[in-house]
Image (cartoon, rainbow, N blue to C red):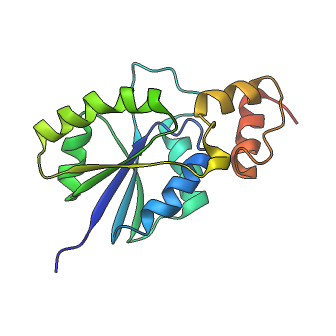
Amino acid sequence: MSRRIGVFPGSFDPVHNGHLDLIERARRLFDVFYIAVLFNDQKQALFSVEERIDLLRDLVGDSDDCRVESFSGLLVDYAREKGATAVIRGLRSGADFDYELPMTLMNRRLAPGIDTIFLLPAPEWIYLSSRLTKEVGSLEGDLTGIAPPLVIEALHRKHGWN
């Protein structure tokens, strides 16, 4: 019997409760689940790849059935290397779908055996994004209930707050 292997890619800069909701639900669908932190030197990230990996590992663990790693290059190449049959993507709105559709179709062309599964976050997280989390955090807004305390503490350190 073959194992079901899934990949959840993202920048996770920073990880927030919407990500964690999707991770928790997607993990149940697979025997092995990879949380793949994108390394993209074209983007200016607040947290380094290593910091993002450490935060995710502290929040969700790192075990034989759930691995947190970084990747660069084509997602389908990473997924194929891991033996994945599916990629998980979160959708919050129709705009997200419009953004994701061409990538999904290209990924299907490049790797026909790897499906994309779209998950909606729980209603209470539908508005969350890393961009908004960083913006509220940079303006010293209250992130309670938006991101885990560990992430809020990391944002405070980044911004030099007490």
Between 64 and 157, the residue placed more toward the observer is 64
Quarter-of-image position of residue 71: top left
User: Taking the image as drawn, is residue 17 in sight?
Assistant: no
Q: Position of residue 131 (x, y in %)?
A: 60, 27
Q: Residue at x 60, y 58 (%)?
A: 58
Q: Is residue 64 above or below residue 16?
A: below
- Image coordinates for residue 92, horizontal then vertical, percent: 52, 38
* Rendering quarter of residue 152: top right
Query: Is residue 80 left or right of 40 when viewed as pictured?
Result: left
Give the side of residue 112 with respect to residue 42, left or right.
Answer: left
Residue for point 59% across, 33% down? 130
Of 53 and 5, nearer the camera is 5
Quick check: 9 above or below 136? below
Residue found 19% across the figure and 51% down from its top: 114
Residue in front for this viewpoint, 41 or 108 = 108
Is 131 situated above or below 22?
above
* Residue 127 placement, left or right of 6: right
Number of numbered tags placed on the structure image = 0
Q: From this viewpoint, which residue is outermost toward the right?
A: 162
Q: Is residue 153 in view?
A: yes
Q: Is residue 144 left or right of residue 86?
A: right
Q: Residue at 88%, 36% (x, y): give it.
A: 162
